[in-house]
Image (tube, coloured by chain):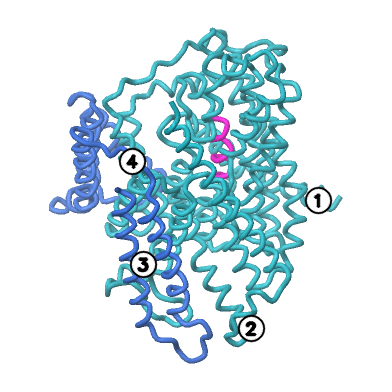
């Protein structure tokens, strides 16, 4: 079933991809044009998606329950880290992210917080000081 | 003789203090990455590319460091196979079969030493092969025109489908997915913005490195979180540190057999180290398993797959360097590095950058010796690393991925793209769709279109030029045969599975 659903989604993407390509106009002097390759990709991709719909593999074992919640939590955490890295500053953001990730990976609060503290400092020294890749150290409102 | 003098120049490049230090650092880090279950060679190389990139290393130094990491990973993968019965990376799966039983029988250090020697033999064999064959192939490849390159890329996708053994429809679909993702951004020839949805962030397209780190490293975290409730694996005791000489050399000719088979598997575009280890083990079992000792700790069952996977990983560098078509996931990632350093691999690489190519080859010889030393007398360091808990390792990998990507462009948009690719990679892995063709499509897409465009400019828009040269016709024939083979295997496999399901 999963394969069929994915096949349908990919088929829709391939069709939309091909139709969009039709809008790209070929310019004078270019024998290929911007639309040709996308068109050449869209057709076989659509056919392969059809094959997936018609001959699906057995379903994979999707995770449910707590592990799935863990994954979702981790995803939210990563998105949040990306969003707030510059606002919170590297040290604070990394400390929070590593602590929470450690907790998600079934460590205790104390150990995760310790690893968060150590890792944020070590990584800052490593990247910013030793490798010379500037990172935003402090929260925006303090800098 | 020509080769010897070029190799001599290569050693002059490889033996400069910086490059030598980077090679040793690469070997160490590589073995570490290989040994730790949870970060395989692809992830390891991928998350270190941005670092190498922003360090502003010379291209040759960056390439030397990452190649040594790559070789190191192949050595390191066996350590957790033997100690924990968990392969440190995918090619090391076959080593668990005899390595772990041997370690459980109290001969862990002997198993580690045997496999280190086998790795050394396999990798050295492949490096010699690389030295001899790569220049030859590069010479032949000079006759390739744009149409032939286009055909070659088509073939690369087909061969990946042929040997990975998974559902070939899915592998091909993955390739098209990669090519479609590659077409996002400004079309270089006409300046048309394609599939950017009006976002200026997408005008440059997706940076392959951002995509790779997402697809491999971030998805790995999601995969790991699935099984986090399981117990941590326990390591067997190491025993006596350095075994006797005579105990290490028990493999005999299994070294040679494994190396040759692995090397041949490595050269095939798209096959790579896992196939090399698998084929070597299967062959060795047929050849020398007379008393049914395989699977119970037979040293030859360790030697063959280890020689095989190391020979294959060296062999996989040949198509990557000479044709620009990577033979495995990790070499695909290294191709991404070359492209971001503005170096176009392929036959002209040997002409234009002899220093780089031969410096790389020479440093691989050095890396092998360094790795042998690190992996026999000093193996205790790496077995201790295995005790590192995942709640430290995983966040560390995530943070290095984020920082690496952030340091390329200082844009949070790239971080979101990386996470997006992580989710995509997780989904594809769950569906048993290989990630390597996606990466390959993403990497080769632009070049494929350029060569198609060049070919059509020559012919004035006539598509028949694609079949005009004997080289391209040959390549299409091979492509067709590979596809038939892949679909044939898949069909037989399905029928076998069905029969097994129907049976009692």
- Dot 4 alpha-carbon crowd within 10 angstroms: few under 14, some 14 to 19, many 20 or more: few
Observer-nearest of B161 and A51: A51
Which chain is cyan in the rendering?
A: B
Label 4: which residue? A60
Q: Is residue B27 left or right of residue A142?
A: right
Name the residue located 50 percent from the left edge and 51 percent from the top edge: B333
- Dot 1 alpha-carbon crowd within 10 angstroms: few under 14, some 14 to 19, many 20 or more: few
Q: Marks 2/1: CA distance?
A: 35 Å
Which chain is blue in the rendering?
A: A
Nearest to N terminus: mark 3 or mark 4: 3
- Parent chain of label 4: A
Q: Main secondary structure of the magenta part?
A: helix
**Residue B57: mark in rendering:** none
**Residue A14: mark in rendering:** 3
- Give yes or no for residue B67 being in the magenta stretch: yes
Q: Marks 4/2: CA distance?
A: 48 Å
Q: Marks 3/4: CA distance?
A: 24 Å
Q: Quadrant of residue B265?
A: top right
Of badges 4 and 2, nearer the viewer stands 4
Q: Is residue B150 left or right of residue B408?
A: right
- Residues flagged by tags 4 and 2 on a common chain: no
Label 1: which residue? B3
Q: Marks 1/4: CA distance?
A: 51 Å
Label 2: which residue? B458
- Image spot of residue B16 (x, y percent): 65, 45
């Amino acid at each position: 079933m999963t394969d069929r659903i994915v096949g349908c989604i990919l088929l829709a993407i391939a069709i939309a991809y091909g139709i969009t390509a039709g809008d790209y106009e070929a310019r004078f002097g270019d024998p290929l044009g911007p639309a040709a390759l996308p068109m050449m990709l869209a057709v076989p991709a659509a056919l392969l998606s059809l094959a997936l719909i018609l001959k699906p593999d057995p379903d994979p074992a999707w995770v449910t329950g707590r592990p799935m919640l863990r994954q979702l939590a981790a995803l939210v955490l990563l998105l949040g880290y990306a969003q707030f890295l510059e606002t919170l500053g590297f040290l604070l953001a990394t400390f929070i992210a590593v602590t929470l990730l450690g907790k998600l990976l079934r460590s205790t609060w104390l150990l995760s917080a310790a690893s968060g503290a150590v890792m944020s400092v070590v990584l800052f020294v490593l990247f910013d000081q030793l490798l010379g890749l500037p990172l935003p150290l402090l929260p925006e409102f303090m800098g | 003789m020509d080769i010897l003098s070029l190799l001599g120049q290569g050693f002059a490049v490889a033996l400069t203090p910086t490059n030598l230090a980077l090679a040793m650092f690469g070997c160490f880090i590589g073995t570490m990455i290989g040994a730790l279950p949870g970060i395989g060679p692809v992830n390891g190389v991928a998350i270190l590319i941005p670092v190498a990139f922003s360090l502003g290393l010379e291209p040759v130094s960056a390439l030397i460091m990452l190649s040594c990491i790559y070789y190191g990973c192949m050595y390191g993968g066996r350590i957790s196979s033997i100690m924990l019965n968990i392969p440190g990376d995918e090619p090391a799966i076959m080593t668990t079969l005899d390595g772990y039983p041997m370690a459980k029988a109290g001969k862990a250090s002997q198993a580690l030493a045997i496999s280190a020697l086998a790795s050394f033999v396999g990798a050295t064999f492949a490096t010699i092969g690389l030295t001899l064959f790569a220049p030859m192939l590069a010479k032949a490849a000079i006759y390739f025109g744009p149409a032939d390159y286009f055909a070659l890329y088509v073939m690369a996708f087909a061969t990946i489908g042929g040997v990975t053994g998974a559902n070939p429809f899915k592998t091909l679909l993955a390739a098209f997915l990669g090519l479609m993702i590659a077409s996002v951004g400004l079309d270089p020839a006409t300046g048309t913005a394609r599939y950017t949805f009006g976002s200026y962030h997408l005008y440059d397209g997706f940076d392959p490195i951002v995509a790779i780190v997402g697809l491999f490293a971030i998805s790995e975290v999601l995969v790991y979180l699935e099984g986090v409730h399981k117990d941590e694996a326990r390591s067997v005791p190491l025993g006596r540190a350095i075994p006797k000489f005579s105990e290490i050399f028990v493999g005999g000719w299994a070294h040679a057999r494994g190396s040759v088979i692995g090397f041949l598997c490595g050269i095939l575009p798209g096959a790579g180290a896992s196939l090399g280890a698998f084929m070597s083990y299967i062959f060795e079992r047929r050849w020398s398993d007379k008393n049914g000792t395989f699977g119970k700790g037979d040293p030859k069952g360790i030697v063959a797959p280890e020689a095989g996977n190391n020979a294959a990983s060296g062999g996989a560098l040949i198509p990557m360097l000479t044709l620009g078509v990577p033979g495995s996931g990790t070499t695909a990632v290294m191709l991404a590095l070359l492209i971001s350093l503005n170096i176009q691999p392929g036959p002209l690489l040997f002409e234009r950058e002899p220093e780089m190519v031969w410096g790389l080859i020479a440093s691989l010889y050095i890396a092998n010796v360094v790795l042998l030393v690190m992996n026999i007398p000093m193996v205790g360091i790496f077995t201790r690393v295995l005790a590192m808990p995942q709640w430290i390792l995983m966040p560390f990998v995530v943070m290095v991925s984020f920082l690496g990507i952030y340091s390329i462009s200082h844009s949070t948009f790239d971080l979101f793209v990386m996470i997006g690719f992580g989710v995509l990679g997780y989904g594809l892995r769950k569906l048993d769709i290989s990630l390597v063709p996606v990466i390959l499509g993403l990497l080769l897409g632009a070049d494929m279109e350029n060569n198609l465009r060049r070919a059509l400019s020559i012919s004035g828009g006539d598509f028949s030029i694609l079949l005009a040269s004997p080289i391209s016709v040959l390549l299409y024939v091979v492509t067709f045969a590979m596809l038939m083979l892949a679909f044939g295997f898949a069909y037989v496999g399905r029928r076998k599975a069905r029969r097994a399901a129907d049976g009692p």
